[in-house]
């Protein structure tokens, strides 16, 4: 706490002198090693991370805040090499979205020996200093509960698009969704299949399902990537009744909630996650005590009207819900929640 | 129609080498001008300058007295100069007429439809004009090499060319096709076409050319009307020395039969051919192209199967199609008719090209003994008097004659018992030819059985201990040294003596 | 044809020094790239980083040496990357079921060879296009890997199995001396045995090699089997490096190997090239790729740079080849 106020004092002084040329005796170097860099979520994530680095560096002139990201392009060998090289360079904080956590155990030890704070991304590691996790089960459950509350009590048929077989995150989300919809009797899962995080496969699935189940009431997915083709196919076939339950908080999907067929979404948002990384690194640097397993704050997104309706139908009042406008705002502007203002 | 082209004082250097040195050369409409010289004398370089393929360093080119610039092949074409290449530039899948009109097709009116009838008519008119019997509608694939050459020339003539350059035009032609080509050349002369004719063959030159020019080391050493000079004089100026005539030594041949072929028959290729070959004997099979001899030789070497009859080698019957590896193991060697296709390995060094069949013998404990290979290679180069700067040189930089010598030199080690040669002197100069004749004779003296296919009657008579003439896959007659009757052999080859079936 | 003699002396000298010149240029570029990257990042020259660099390209060394044999025959092997995944899968599953690391090594190499032999039989015996055949096995081996792994990775903790790919002596990974030994062994095979000369003969002119009784069809089968065996060996190294068997390992490896081999001066048309060139090619390529990571070059650009290197080298080669042919 003392440290923080000293910094704040320095900041005020620096600002008062109208100079950014204060001697920067303090530095924070952050490296983010990701498994890929081309999916829309990745792109938003990495650019959020870059923007946040720049914003923090500007907001805290007494600390030289730098950072960069690397992409392993899905290759474990490449990720290990990148990690080794990065450890050798000795940054302060490393976020690693390990493709296979076991392969990274020796590297975590090596990094810690070099005084680097290791943050395991998404898949928690006991050995890591921190694990940045997504509440996949809780989020999935929220999506399922929303579906129950908005299904209207009549018999309700839903088909679910899953992640790649064996992918832990996809399976957790799937389990959560099933848990949520088990809260009511009327929702019936008529089909579920993996679409391998692939938009084209999702398109094929959506086409098949809409033909095979003419009475289908909803399509649920473990990523918003599946929603784009599903919505387009339903629109093309003139199906205006079917509902969509998304996951990820992609802006174009959330924009189709007000007056549209998308009923609920989970506000991950790559941009937000990127900003949250930098905020987290900064807080660690300032000596703040964080939970060893840090859950990314991911509220459910509903329209205000639907939220009211859901509450009437027994949706739990303690679930944090963002309305569409607010969700769109924070998804586009990561600094609103995780910017320098959030820690000053 | 009295065009003439004059090249004056042409000079060209490649790095330090003077490839053309102050060369004057003219070609006049209605005449054949023969250009001769050993490989490397500068003939092709001179023609490449004329064709715009390479640029001269000095000199002028004049068309009818006016200087012209030939900076690229397209300029040469514009001035009516056409090069006929040894490798045909025709598209096999198209017809004769399509090939001739390729790139300047005729259309029906303003439509995008080809006027096939008109194109065929015009081609036929040209063919008639030169007394040629070819169907404009037949696909080029079906033509033999002589006919393809004619199509190329017709194409050049129909693109308004008046000067045709032919580089070794008869090297791949049968006697029959050669005669037809000469007839065609005479008709072209009569029609006012100028021809530059590059060749090694004296009878051809003195048969059709008005003027002969000899080049040596990038210079003109002789330029005369053919009526004012002789074959001997031309050969002498070509080499700079009097070329000793190769004289076949008298020798006795053992009775030890190495190869015995009985009733060999393969549909469409050869029928009921029988002969034997003794150790130390040179047996030449001859005939026209299509006489079946190359196919026969390949069957003996184990390259083909599916024949009837038997081939016995060293007293045992060979399994059909047993493959060249088995043949080589058993002491056979072969020099194929197409050096570049399956004779040499262009990318590899002279050493690798020579040593390849010998490697197992130079291997101990799985590793090659480099010194042993080096000794073999040095010996092979020496014995064949191959000209190469070093065994490391890539073979593709050697001249045709030297490449051919290397194809021979592979087989010179002592384990060789039977050597099969297909057209052993095709497309090489007289010097290299003499060396190759000498090598063949030495091998035979050593006791190697040599089976040769040759289409050149003079070569056949010069080399053979025994000759078998073939006509359309059948053996016609057998002749033994020195009782060779050239006229009768030629008649055999042409099918005139067919009923007189002979036995070896 | 007749004029070539006149051009002979100079052209021949150029041809002899051609490869040597290439190696000198490569060595120069390696130095240049190292200096450049060390200016951009002071960490580049650290012993640790050199160890990381060598370890990261160990697999590329192995696969590229096999690719050199293949490309000397004028062929190409697109299946090596997938084959690394497949062979690794076979090895890891053998290890987990039998518990024997040597048996795992053996089956990994045999599995790699099996794919290679299939390539070789189709290409050498049945005379099919190397590009098409290995494109098919590229998909086939990846599919097999996904099937045997059931699309998920398998963790490996057996220290013997991990030793080759995972252990370091100080800053020097064990795998580097191992790669050097393989290089020496393959050099002996290529330059000192009849088999090696047959590799060149098959590539320079298949027909001639056949007529000379060199059985090029048989050589080709063995050459692809060798490439497969080296993929199997690479699989063992890869598993050791990542402590697990990965169904997606070896992705894009064929691209990197082909680029490195061409960079090393091996002709696309067969018959020309040496293993030393491949070693230099892998080093240069590895330094560039590693350097891009170190200097924090945008990953979007890295793929672009790889593609430009390949295109540039192919263009350069075709120019020099054309120059020699004229």
Image (cartoon, coloured by chain):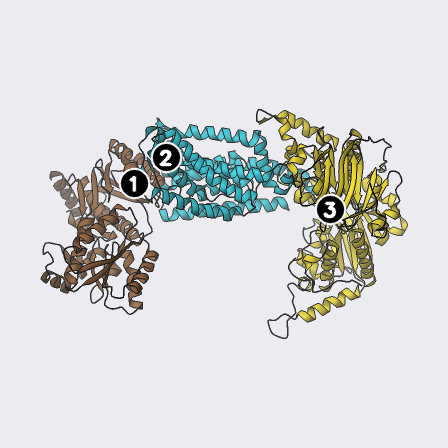
Chain colours: A brown, B yellow, C cyan
Q: In front of the other: label 3 or label 2? A: 3
Q: Position of residue A101 (x, y in %)?
A: 27, 39
Secondary structure at numbered mark 1 = loop
Provide the residue designation for mark 3: B265
Residue plotted at (16% across, 62% down): A150
Residue plotted at (77% across, 62% down): B133
A195 relative to B133 in the view: left or right: left
Q: In front of the other: label 1 or label 2? A: 2
Secondary structure at numbered mark 3 = strand
Residue A324, image quadrant: bottom left
Provide the residue designation for mark 2: C94
> B85 and A150: which one is in front?
A150
* Host chain of mark 1: A
Provide the residue designation for mark 1: A100
How far apart, in angstroms, are the residues tagged by discs 1 and 3?
Answer: 69 Å
* Host chain of mark 2: C
Mark 1 burial class by Cα count in 10 Å: few <14, some 14-19, many 20+: some
């Amino acid at each position: 706490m003392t440290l923080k106020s000293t910094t704040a004092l320095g900041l005020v002084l620096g600002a008062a002198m109208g100079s950014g040329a204060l001697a920067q005796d303090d530095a924070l170097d952050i490296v983010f090693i990701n498994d890929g860099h081309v999916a829309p979520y990745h792109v938003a994530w990495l650019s959020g991370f870059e923007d946040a680095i720049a914003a923090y560096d500007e907001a805290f002139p007494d600390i030289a805040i730098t950072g960069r990201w690397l992409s392993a392009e899905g290759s474990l060998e490449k990720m290990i090499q990148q990690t080794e090289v990065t450890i050798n360079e000795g940054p302060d904080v490393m976020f690693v979205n390990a493709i296979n956590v076991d392969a990274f155990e020796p590297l975590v030890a090596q990094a810690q020996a070099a005084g680097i704070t290791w943050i395991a991304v998404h898949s928690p590691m006991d050995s890591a200093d921190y694990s940045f996790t997504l509440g996949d089960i809780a989020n999935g459950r929220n999506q399922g509960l929303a579906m129950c509350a908005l299904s209207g009590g009549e018999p309700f048929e839903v088909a679910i698009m899953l992640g790649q077989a064996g992918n832990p995150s996809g399976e957790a989300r799937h389990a959560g969704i099933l848990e949520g919809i088990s809260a009511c009797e009327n929702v019936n899962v008529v089909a579920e299949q993996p679409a391998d995080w692939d938009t084209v496969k999702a398109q094929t699935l959506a086409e098949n399902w809409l033909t095979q189940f003419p009475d289908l009431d909803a399509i649920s997915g473990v990523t918003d990537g599946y929603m784009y083709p599903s919505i387009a196919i339903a629109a093309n076939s003139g199906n205006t009744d079917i509902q969509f339950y998304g996951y990820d908080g992609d802006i174009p999907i959330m924009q189709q909630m007000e007056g549209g067929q998308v009923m609920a979404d989970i506000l991950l948002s790559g941009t937000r996650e990127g900003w949250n990384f930098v905020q987290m690194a900064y807080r660690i640097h300032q000596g703040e005590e964080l939970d060893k397993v840090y859950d990314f704050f991911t509220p459910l997104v509903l329209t205000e009207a639907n939220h009211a309706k859901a509450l009437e139908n027994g949706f739990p009042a303690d679930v944090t819900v963002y309305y569409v406008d607010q969700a769109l705002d924070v998804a586009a502007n990561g600094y609103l929640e995780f910017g320098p203002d959030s820690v000053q | 129609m009295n065009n003439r082209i004059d090249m004056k004082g042409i000079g060209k250097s490649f790095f330090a080498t003077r490839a053309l040195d102050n060369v004057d050369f003219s070609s006049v409409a209605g005449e054949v001008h023969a250009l001769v010289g050993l490989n490397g004398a500068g003939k092709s370089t001179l023609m490449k300058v004329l064709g715009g393929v390479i640029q001269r360093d000095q000199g002028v080119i004049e068309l009818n007295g006016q200087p012209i610039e030939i900076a690229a092949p397209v300029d040469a074409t514009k001035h009516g100069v056409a090069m006929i290449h040894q490798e045909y530039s025709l598209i096999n899948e198209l017809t004769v007429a399509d090939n001739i009109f390729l790139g300047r097709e005729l259309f029906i009116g303003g439509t995008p439809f080809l006027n096939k009838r008109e194109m065929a008519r015009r081609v036929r008119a040209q063919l008639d004009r030169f007394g040629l019997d070819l169907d404009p509608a037949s696909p080029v694939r079906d033509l033999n090499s002589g006919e393809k050459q004619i199509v190329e020339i017709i194409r050049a003539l129909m693109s308004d060319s008046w000067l045709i350059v032919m580089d070794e035009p008869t090297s791949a032609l049968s006697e029959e096709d050669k005669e037809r080509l000469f007839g065609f050349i005479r008709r072209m002369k009569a029609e006012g076409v100028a021809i530059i004719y590059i060749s090694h063959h004296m009878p051809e030159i003195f048969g059709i050319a008005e003027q002969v020019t000899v080049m040596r080391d990038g210079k003109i050493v002789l330029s005369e009307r053919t009526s004012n000079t002789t074959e001997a004089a031309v050969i002498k100026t070509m080499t700079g020395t009097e070329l000793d005539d190769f004289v076949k030594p008298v020798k006795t041949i053992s009775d030890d039969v190495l190869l015995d072929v009985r009733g060999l028959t393969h549909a469409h290729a050869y029928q009921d051919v029988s002969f034997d070959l003794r150790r130390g004997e040179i047996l030449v099979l001859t005939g026209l192209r299509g006489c079946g001899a190359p196919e026969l030789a390949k069957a003996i070497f184990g390259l083909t199967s599916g024949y009837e009859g038997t081939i016995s080698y060293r007293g045992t019957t060979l399994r059909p199609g047993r493959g060249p590896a088995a043949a080589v193991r058993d002491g056979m060697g072969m020099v194929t008719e197409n050096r570049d296709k399956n004779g040499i390995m262009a990318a590899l060094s002279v050493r690798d090209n020579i040593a390849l069949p010998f490697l197992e013998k130079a291997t101990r404990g799985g590793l090659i003994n480099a010194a042993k290979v080096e000794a073999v290679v040095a010996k092979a180069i020496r014995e064949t008097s191959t000209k190469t700067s070093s065994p490391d040189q890539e073979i593709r930089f050697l001249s045709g004659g030297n490449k051919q010598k290397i194809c021979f030199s592979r087989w010179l080690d002592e384990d060789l018992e039977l050597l099969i040669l297909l057209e052993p002197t095709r497309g090489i100069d007289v010097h290299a030819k003499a060396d190759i004749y000498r090598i063949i004779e030495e091998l035979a003296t050593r006791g190697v059985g040599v089976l040769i296919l040759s289409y050149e009657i003079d070569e056949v008579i010069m080399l053979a201990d025994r000759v078998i003439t073939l006509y359309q896959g059948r053996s016609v007659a057998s002749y033994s040294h020195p009782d060779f009757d050239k006229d009768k052999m030629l008649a055999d080859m042409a099918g005139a003596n067919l009923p007189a079936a002979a036995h070896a | 044809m007749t004029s070539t003699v006149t051009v002979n002396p100079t052209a021949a000298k150029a041809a002899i020094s051609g490869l040597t010149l290439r190696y000198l240029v490569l060595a120069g570029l390696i130095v240049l790239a190292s200096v450049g990257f060390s200016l951009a990042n002071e960490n580049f020259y650290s012993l640790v980083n050199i160890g990381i660099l060598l370890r990261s390209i160990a697999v590329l060394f192995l696969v590229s040496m096999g690719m050199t044999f293949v490309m000397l025959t004028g062929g190409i092997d697109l299946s090596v990357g997938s084959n690394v995944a497949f062979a690794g899968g076979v090895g890891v599953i053998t290890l987990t079921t039998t518990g024997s690391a040597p048996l795992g090594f053996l089956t990994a190499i045999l599995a790699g060879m099996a794919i290679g032999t299939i390539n070789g039989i189709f290409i050498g015996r049945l005379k099919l296009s190397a590009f098409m055949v290995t494109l098919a096995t590229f998909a086939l081996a990846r599919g097999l890997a996904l099937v045997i792994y059931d699309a998920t990775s398998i963790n490996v903790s057996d220290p013997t199995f991990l030793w080759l790919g995972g252990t370091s002596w100080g800053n020097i990974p064990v795998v580097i001396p191992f790669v050097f030994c393989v290089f020496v062994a393959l050099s002996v095979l290529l330059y000192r045995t009849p088999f090696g000369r047959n590799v060149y003969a098959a590539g320079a002119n298949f027909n001639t090699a056949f007529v000379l009784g060199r059985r090029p069809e048989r050589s080709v089968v063995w050459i692809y089997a060798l490439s497969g065996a080296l993929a199997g060996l690479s699989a063992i190294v890869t598993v050791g490096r990542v402590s697990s068997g990965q169904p997606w390992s070896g992705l894009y490896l064929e691209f990197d190997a082909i680029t490195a081999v061409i960079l090393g001066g091996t002709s696309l048309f067969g018959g020309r090239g040496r293993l030393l060139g491949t070693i230099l090619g892998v080093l240069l390529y590895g330094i560039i790729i590693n350097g891009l990571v170190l200097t924090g070059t945008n990953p979007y650009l890295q793929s672009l740079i790889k593609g430009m290197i390949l295109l540039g080298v192919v263009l350069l080669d075709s120019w020099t080849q054309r120059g020699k042919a004229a």
